[in-house]
Image (cartoon, rainbow, N blue to C red):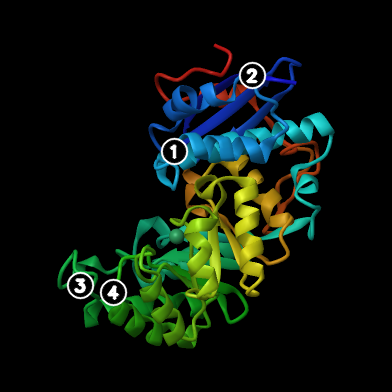
């Protein structure tokens, strides 16, 4: 079997969702989702396709390293690696279809049939950052069946800032942020998990002041308290608070995660499968973390198809903790119609791991065509 074509296109979701289709001389095709954002489809077609046409698609890991090696210097992260991750996912889908097994089987098998989700609600109800709106939004997530809720605390008190760029938190910001989290905990009780994301915005000292104030609320994790680039600073935060520190959505490949894991500079990883290098790379990162008994969570800003790829990894790693559901994307009303699966993918606040060949789901072509980004066409047009 040989690869005959690699195609890519973009849907307009709450981000630009990028899809890859790999075609073969035997008519079997593989589908994947690359990292969101502009420019990725160009990279897939112009840079990666020439590296793949004529090759045996079943050599997934060698093809991954071939793409990395031929784009060296550009594939440590960013657009190139986000494109490679989508192609790698499509290769796994293809391999699973050829061999008639789900991807998790090719990764060694599954530890679980369903995955714990946490609902990333973003801001308070109506996009408002008041204790009442945060409490209301948390109740909405719980009413939908989710047992863990995540809020973005960054920019929730900007009107109280001393300075918008110095990574500091004013006393008034700290006070308001504390009331927001307190209102959530009060609204949903003690047994629902709450996570707080800082998006890497703060300095070590001030985010530790925030952490100290949030410790009584038993958070599931505090995410990206400082920018992720400085592992020593992340490690200092981790060592200085009892709240589990979570990071990883902006970290790439095993090389990027190595020191973070080995120095235990965080308590748990948050890996974006589409950004970090794809399915097998994410599994290897999770396995490296498991050597340190460090939990693995899956970050998602992709469409439901990309979530399915993350679900196969999450099913196949021992140290899986939870998977992100971009609950804030509920404005994209059609997104769950985009793919067709044997079972409803979300049941009782959990993600059901598909067990069909490859990713185990198919695209709904009608919905897909209806939401193409302007200037983009379906794969075969
Ligand atoms: Mg985050």
> Marks 2 and 4: which is nearer the front?
2
Looking at mark 1, is its residue's CB closer than 8 Å to ligand 1? no
Disc ID at residue 54: 2
Q: Which residue is mark 3?
A: 160
Secondary element at image label 2 = loop
- Residue 371 visible, this orientation: no
Mark closer to the observer (1, 3)? 1
Distance of label 4 from label 1 (alpha carbons): 30 Å
**Residue at label 4?**
203
Q: Nearer the viewer, residue 244 or 350?
A: 244
Q: Secondary structure at mark 1?
A: helix
- At x 40%, y 40%, the residue is 74
Q: CA distance from mark 1 to mark 3?
A: 39 Å
Pick the quarter of the image with the C terminus.
top right
Instruction: Give the x, y percent position of residue 345.
Output: 71, 46
- The correct choice, above or below, for 149 with respect to 377 in the image is below
Q: Secondary structure at mark 3?
A: helix
Residue sitting nearer the eye, 298 or 140: 298
In the picture of the structure, the residue carrying the numbered disc 1 is 80
**Within 10 angstroms of label 1, few (less than 14), some, or many (20 or more) residues?**
many
Q: From the image, which quarter does the N terminus lie in?
A: top right
């Amino acid at each position: 079997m040989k690869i005959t074509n690699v195609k890519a296109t973009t849907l307009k979701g709450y981000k630009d969702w990028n899809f890859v289709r790999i075609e073969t001389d035997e008519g079997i095709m593989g589908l994947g989702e690359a990292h969101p954002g502009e420019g990725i489809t160009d990279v897939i077609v112009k840079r990666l396709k020439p590296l793949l046409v004529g090759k045996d698609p079943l050599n997934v890991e060698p093809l991954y390293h071939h793409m990395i090696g031929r784009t060296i210097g550009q594939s440590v992260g960013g657009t190139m690696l986000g494109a490679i991750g989508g192609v790698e996912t499509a290769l796994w889908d293809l391999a699973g279809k050829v061999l008639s097994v789900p991807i998790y089987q090719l990764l060694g098998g599954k530890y679980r049939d369903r995955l714990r989700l946490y609902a990333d609600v973003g801001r308070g109800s109506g996009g408002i950052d008041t204790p009442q709106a945060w409490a209301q939004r948390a109740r909405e997530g719980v009413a939908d069946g989710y047992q863990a809720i995540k809020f973005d605390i960054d920019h929730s008190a900007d009107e109280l800032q001393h300075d918008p760029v110095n990574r500091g938190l004013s006393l008034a910001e700290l006070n308001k942020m504390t009331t927001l989290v307190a209102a959530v905990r009060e609204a949903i009780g003690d047994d629902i998990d709450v996570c707080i994301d800082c998006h890497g915005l703060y300095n070590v000292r001030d985010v530790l002041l925030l952490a100290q104030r949030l410790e009584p609320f038993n958070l599931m994790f505090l995410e990206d308290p400082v920018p992720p680039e400085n592992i020593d600073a992340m490690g200092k935060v981790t060592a200085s608070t009892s709240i589990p520190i979570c990071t990883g959505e902006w970290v790439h490949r095993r090389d990027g995660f190595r020191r973070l894991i080995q120095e235990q500079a965080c308590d748990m990883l948050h890996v974006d499968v589409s950004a970090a290098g794809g399915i097998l790379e994410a599994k290897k990162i999770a396995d490296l973390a498991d050597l340190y008994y460090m939990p693995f969570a899956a970050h998602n800003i992709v469409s439901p198809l990309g979530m399915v790829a993350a679900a196969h990894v999450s099913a196949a790693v021992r140290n899986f903790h939870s998977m992100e559901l971009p609950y804030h994307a509920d404005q994209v009303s059609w997104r769950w119609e985009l793919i067709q699966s044997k079972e409803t993918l979300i049941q009782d606040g959990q993600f059901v791991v598909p067990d069909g060949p490859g990713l185990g789901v198919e695209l709904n072509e009608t919905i897909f065509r209806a939401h193409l980004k302007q200037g983009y066409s379906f794969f075969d047009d």
